[in-house]
Image (tube, rainbow, N blue to C red):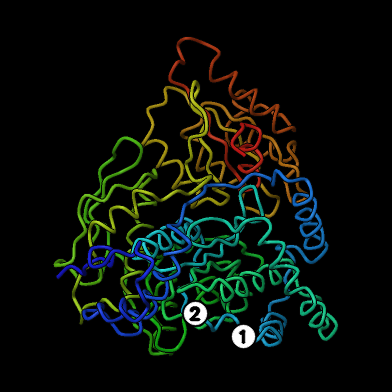
């Protein structure tokens, strides 16, 4: 039986709707969820419907912009995201002095190697479709640091971001004084997010780990739903050199009695996850067994899906349009849908489905900046934040399936701590030529070093070096336009979220 949508039962736009009246109507829902939903709907009477935003620009007000830059500078003065001391001691101390804000709402916790942010955005859109107020915490950002903390599908306003920082700053300094090491950049941002979600307040938080799981700063929440996107080799110097070792770290997000939504995994990684689930009496739903993608067709602007939910064959969701490219995004959609079903208590023992119209509306509105995102035409320029071999293979497959380029030019700028050769080898079959470059951060691999590896993979005649990203973009577009013969040529900018974000700005999308 399909679950009726709240909006079908009651007009939430009437200001005289009371909290008690809304709860009274929810006779077919779990009482606790009815209260959560009713509270959210009452807030929306005044707040209005959430409006999604892709990537926010810099504040137009000079004073606000300067205040945001000051916050960014103070955060940048702390340990960066690549310098870690594997412990949740500091973040736990911060949560303690803040009054444990992360326990003020239920949460869905997402780990894995690739697809976490896209999956988080889909989960958020689905929850919003059922009129739950959401907080989303993801990383890294594409262009603006405010992207990392979202309420109801939109990054928080710069003023609110600044306020969140100023609110917790005295407590951060208190913890800094008590610990051997100061709180890191990521730990402070995590504290800001959890506090902002409690202040909003949100009905549910959708939280993406920064790295790993067990000792990740986000792992001070006790989520009822843990999501594990595909695991592959990345951050091997910190997480392990095999999928099984990496899975061991990521399994730390699985809490006692939780439901685990497990995307398709390497066998050894899946075994680790299943063992952890048994240890903590968690319920596991596996893609390809308990849920999955039943069918998929390429469509204009995306793809058309049929997804099977946790209730089995009886709970299929048909004619789902997803405006994202690639088979990997279809699998992310299946994972996201099952995570939301699990949050609502749907499973094999309670085989019901969510409202299909709400599901279709939610997926049709999903955006995921920097993930096979088209930012220009004539020639077509696509951005993808792939930064490891598995992500590169998914991007290569997706662009080959969705676009009919007669010739594709790559613009690649990577970080120095990645498997650069593996990434380049994944793109070699689809790039006619590659322009290697570097982004503006200290983590960027030197363009000449990257070129040396690229020559070994592509051959000298297919590699061009342009250390400045703006020059690299211009060179790639020129190569794509150089002959009438290549009227169907395109450009793919990839290798790093930072490279993609800077290219986005240069191409006028910021």
Extreme residue in the right direction: 177
Report the disc number at residue 100: 1
Q: Nearer the viewer, residue 358 or 253?
A: 358
Report the disc number at residue 356: none
User: What residue does disc 2 label?
Assistant: 105
- Element carrying mark 2: loop
Quarter of the image with the C terminus in it: top right
Residue visible at 21% across and 58% down in the picture: 317
- Element carrying mark 1: loop
Spot occupied by residue 339 in the image (x, y as percentages of width and height): 36, 69
Contact flag, marks 2 and 1 (Cβ < 8 Å): no
Residue visible at 44% across and 58% down in the picture: 48
Kindly indicate the quadrant of the structure image that contains residue 473. top right
Residue visible at 33% across and 65% down in the picture: 12
Spot occupied by residue 377 in the image (x, y as percentages of width and height): 48, 25
Spot occupied by residue 291 in the image (x, y as percentages of width and height): 26, 66
Neighbor class of circle 1 (other Cα within 10 Å; few <14, some 14-19, many 20+) is some
Is residue 38 shown left or right of residue 451? left
Kindly indicate the quadrant of the structure image that contains residue 226. bottom left
Residue visible at 43% across and 77% down in the picture: 273
Which is nearer the N-term, disc 2 or disc 1?
Answer: 1
């Amino acid at each position: 039986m399909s679950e009726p949508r709240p909006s079908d039962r009651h007009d939430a736009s009437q200001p005289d709707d009371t909290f008690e009246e809304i709860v009274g109507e929810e006779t077919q829902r779990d009482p606790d969820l009815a209260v959560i939903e009713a509270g959210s709907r009452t807030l929306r009477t005044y707040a209005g419907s959430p409006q999604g935003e892709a990537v926010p620009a810099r504040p137009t007000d000079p004073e606000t912009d300067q205040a945001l830059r000051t916050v960014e500078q103070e955060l940048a003065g702390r340990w960066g995201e690549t310098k870690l001391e594997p412990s949740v001691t500091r973040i736990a101390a911060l949560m303690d002095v803040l009054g444990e804000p992360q326990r003020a709402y239920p949460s869905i916790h997402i780990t894995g190697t690739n697809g976490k942010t896209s999956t988080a955005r889909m989960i958020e859109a689905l929850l919003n479709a059922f009129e739950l107020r959401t907080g989303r915490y993801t990383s890294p950002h594409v262009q603006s640091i405010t992207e990392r903390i979202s309420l109801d599908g939109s990054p928080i306003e710069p003023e609110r971001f600044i306020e969140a920082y100023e609110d917790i700053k005295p407590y951060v300094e208190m913890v800094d004084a008590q610990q051997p090491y100061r709180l890191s950049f990521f730990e402070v941002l995590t504290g800001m997010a959890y506090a902002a979600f409690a202040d909003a307040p949100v009905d549910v938080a959708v939280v993406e780990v920064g790295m790993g799981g067990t000792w990740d700063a986000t792992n001070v929440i006790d989520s009822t739903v843990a999501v594990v996107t595909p695991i592959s080799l990345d951050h091997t110097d910190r997480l392990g050199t095999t999928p099984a070792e990496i899975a061991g770290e990521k399994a730390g997000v699985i809490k006692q009695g939780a439901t685990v939504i497990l995307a398709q995994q390497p066998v050894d990684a899946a075994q680790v996850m299943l063992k952890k689930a048994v240890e903590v009496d968690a319920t596991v739903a596996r893609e390809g067994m308990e849920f999955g993608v039943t069918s998929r067709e390429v469509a204009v602007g995306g793809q058309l899906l049929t997804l099977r939910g946790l209730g089995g064959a009886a709970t299929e969701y048909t004619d789902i349009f997803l405006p994202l490219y690639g088979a990997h995004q279809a699998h992310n959609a299946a994972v996201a849908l099952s995570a939301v079903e699990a949050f609502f208590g749907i499973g094999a023992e309670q085989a019901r489905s969510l409202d299909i119209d709400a599901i279709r509306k939610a997926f049709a509105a999903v955006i995921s900046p920097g993930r096979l995102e088209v930012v220009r035409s004539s020639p077509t320029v696509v951005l993808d934040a792939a930064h490891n071999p598995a992500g590169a293979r998914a991007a290569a497959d997706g662009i080959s399936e969705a676009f009919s380029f007669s010739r594709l030019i790559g613009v690649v700028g990577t970080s120095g701590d990645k498997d650069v050769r593996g990434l380049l080898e994944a793109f070699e079959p689809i790039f006619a030529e590659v322009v290697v470059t570097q982004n503006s951060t200290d983590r960027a691999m030197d363009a000449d070093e990257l070129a040396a590896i690229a020559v070994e993979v592509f051959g000298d005649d297919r590699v061009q070096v342009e250390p400045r990203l703006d020059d690299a973009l211009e060179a790639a577009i020129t190569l794509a336009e150089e002959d009438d013969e290549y009227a169907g040529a395109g450009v793919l900018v990839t290798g790093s979220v930072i490279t993609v974000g800077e290219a986005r700005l240069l191409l006028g999308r910021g």
